[in-house]
Image: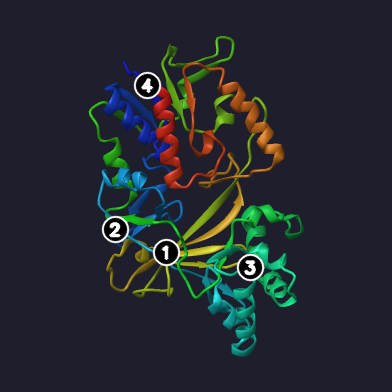
Amino acid sequence: MYDYIVVGAGFCGSVIARKIAEELGKKVLVLEKRKHIAGNMYDEFDEYGILVQRYGPHTFVTNQKELAEFVKKYGEWRDYDVTARVEIDGNLMPIPFNFRSIELFYGKEKSAVLIDKLKKAFPGQARIPVYMLTDNTDPAIQEYGKLLFEKDYIPYTSKQWGIPPEKIGASVIARVQIALSYDEKYMQQTYQMMPEDGFTKIFHNILNHKNINVQTGTDALDMITADGAEHRVLYNGHEIPVIYTGPIDELFGLKYGRLPYRSLDIVFQTKDMDYFQSVAFIAYPQANGYTRSCEYKYLTGQKVNGKTTLSIEYPLQYDPNALKGNIPYYPVINDENRKKYQQYKNLADKFQNLYVCGRLGDYKYYNMDAAIERALEVFNQIKA
């Protein structure tokens, strides 16, 4: 018999399972609906020997040393700085937008004037949110901000979230920043890494413990029931502590309605050449239907001659009844959905032997480091 049931073999579920098995010495059963571990970080070699991430590209980034040290315990990692471009009007431009972008947009003479104005308007600041351009009183700075919104942020966000451009609020893109320099570093976190042998191997090592048993291709909801009268979760009729990282609405039979998500249709292409793109990532705000491409050899550092594999992302609405691999990626956060989630959260809190967490359980879009941090937080609750 098991001491704990963990639903889901992504970062939250896997990390909690390992901590329970290792630190508490308890037996854990991990149930994973998909036929593999590692959640959306799952990667595998394609027929050409190129390691691809089946649910879209991921890189591990964090500012927290302890989280970087945690993942290093389970495999070899190498430093990796993400480089990206955006295609606008047929030209590739740096991401983040920077002084080089201004030169490409306006030419040498006009860009020099604008760059000088930006330095004076935002002294000592390395990066600023893009909305600060349109909020500025200088007409030239406002014009540049409007240009970025019209050619990049509005069309890209509209495709990504499936909402009309006129309904895109400032809060949706408030976190997007531009560089007030020639800096082309895509991410600013202190630790930026890729696993030498892929993410799946990292998860294999996390779950490789004598007290952990993993069952893939298993729908936990076939065995787990939430007894509303007694406020307890049962596994095959037995009351056992359950860590649940699946969709919280499905755990409770969609009692308050389904929580919506955005999904992706990811199309893979292999080219008969060493490299197809000049960088790992290219964003396409003006393209029809797709938003981004990724060339995986840049991420893996592999040397595969004459072949290269890319993925192209087409955003779409999550449909649980879709026949083709449609899975929930991004929670659609708005007031209505927050209220619906809170109803599920309030209900879950009444169950003494239930711990809900993860991207689907918490209805939050976690980066990898945030998912690990959340897992450690929940483990401390269990330990206490």
Is disc 1 surrounded by few (<14), some (14 to 19) or many (20+) residues within 10 Å? some
| Element class at badge 2 | strand
Residue farthest along the left direction in this orientation: 210
Camera sees residue 8 = no
Q: Return the disc, 3 or 4, that comes first in the chain's sequence.
A: 4
The quarter holding residue 230 reads top right
Residue 163 location (% of width, % of height): 70, 54
The quarter holding residue 287 reads bottom right
Q: Which numbered dot is residue 78? A: 2
Task: Name the kind of residue labelled 3 in the image.
Answer: Asp
Q: Return the disc, 1 or 4, that comes first in the chain's sequence.
A: 4
Verify CB contact (< 8 Å) between mark 2 and mark 3.
no
Mark pair 3, 4: CA separation: 47 Å
Residue 71 location (% of width, % of height): 32, 45
- What residue appears at the point 56 percent right and 73 percent down from the top-left corner? 87
Residue highlighted by disc 3: 152
Task: Name the kind of residue labelled 4 in the image.
Answer: Tyr
Residue highlighted by disc 4: 4
| Element class at badge 1 | loop
| Element class at badge 4 | strand
- What residue appears at the point 50 percent right and 46 percent down from the top-left corner? 325
